[in-house]
Amino acid sequence: MADRYLRFTGTAPGRFLTRRLGLPQPAPLLRWSPEHPALEGGWVHLRAGRSDLDLEPVLARTGLTAATSGAPAAVVLDASGVRDVDSLAEVHAALHPVVRSVAASGRIVVLGAPLDAADHHQAAAQQALEGFVRSLGKEIGRGRTVNLVRLTDAAAAESTLRFLLSPRSAYVSGQVVAVGEGAQPDTDRDRPLTGRTALVTGAARGIGEAVAETLARDGARVVVLDVPQAEEDAARVAARLGGSALTLDITAADAGERIAAALPDGLDVLVHNAGITRDRRLVNMPAERWSSVLDVNLASVLRTTDALLKEGTLRPGGRIVATASIAGLAGNAGQTNYGASKAGIVGLVRALAPRALAEHGVTVNAVAPGFIETKMTAAVPLFIREAGRRMNSLAQGGLPADVAETTAWLAHPGSGAVNGQVVRVCGQSLLGA
């Protein structure tokens, strides 16, 4: 559904009126397209504290060049060497002179270090970076985003920096991503999933369809999974993407075994996207509404993941990406069932990620969408819909493509050092952590 308010604020009368009334002034976001695959401008590399990170080679592979003049499209601040309160002053000193000059739809990425449990001064200073980044994201405006990446190895963070310093991350802001260590495989930059098989549940429409489309764009052979009632739509999407369709009830006890049987050659990317809502306040919620949401959104994810790992269907180097939600992080009235199911996904990711990597060579992460423009949100009453759109730092709803691009980054062969992360795709919602 068209965001008429966003269009209105893009006009001269709209800018004047909203400024006078103190209303939100969302900026059109620069998203990835074949015509605009990169940000428009160069990067600036700044430092705070003493760091050993070798960033220049990695930044040179992001698709941007070092800025020599004009408004930079991206600013990368290496604050991994910040170890005490005094060195936090260097963060202010580095960004204060340049933050106003960052181009519209530009990016600021702050690089931090893991918290040192043996040094509470370093831990305090590094934790301070989270509050700094999230606060800056809420004030910077003009479609610009601010994120924090915790790392020890710059090379292992290449896929993450390429994502965050690109139009693909247009609706990702105020996030903290931890990147471990790991080698970067040699992949086709434009089609990194070439030769890999991806299965997306609930892919016949909406966000699932956008995820399948993006993974196919990146070279994957996509299996479009949905319920038997959506067989025609699933077949249509699969045919368009050059993939295949698989229809089954994901809540069936043998769903995992049936998926494994349909993929005898194995699977590289598993995207748990299927989900339902059955909204009602708890006092009015019958048991069936509770159980159906928990079964589809959480129990089926647990069962199929366990089965596919046990069967060895997910090959080493594989990726599992599950769909959580802002409702699972911040809660939402009338959605105790949905919020519980999506919070359960977060628990699954955090507990399974280290074990799945150690035992199977597979990473486990989640995306947590906020207000995304879909047929479901288009049916929400007008004033509630408008509130949902504006209650984030970018003051607008996201698109299914925003969730899909984030999923594609987590599915990237070079994202093996990203594990156990829950990344909100919400324009930095004003609700939740």
Image: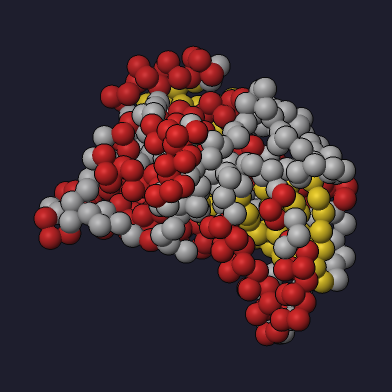
Comparing 189 with 384, the one in front is 384
Q: Position of residue 379 (x, y in %)?
A: 26, 35
Q: Nearer the viewer, residue 335 or 351?
A: 335
> Can you tell which quarter of the image residue 316 is in?
top right
Residue that appears at 70% across and 48% down: 102
Residue 106 or 243: which is nearer the viewer?
Answer: 106
Q: Residue 1 in the image: state x and y as whole percent.
A: 36, 29
Residue under the image location 85 percent in, 67 percent down: 51
**In terms of image quadrants, where is residue 304?**
top left
Q: Is residue 238 left or right of residue 170?
A: left
- Say left or right for 412 vs 286: right
Q: Position of residue 12 (x, y in %)?
A: 50, 33
Q: Residue at x 48, y 19 (%)?
A: 238
* Quadrant of residue 312 within the rendered picture: top right
Q: Residue at x 38, y 57 (%)?
A: 328
Q: Is residue 207 visible?
A: no
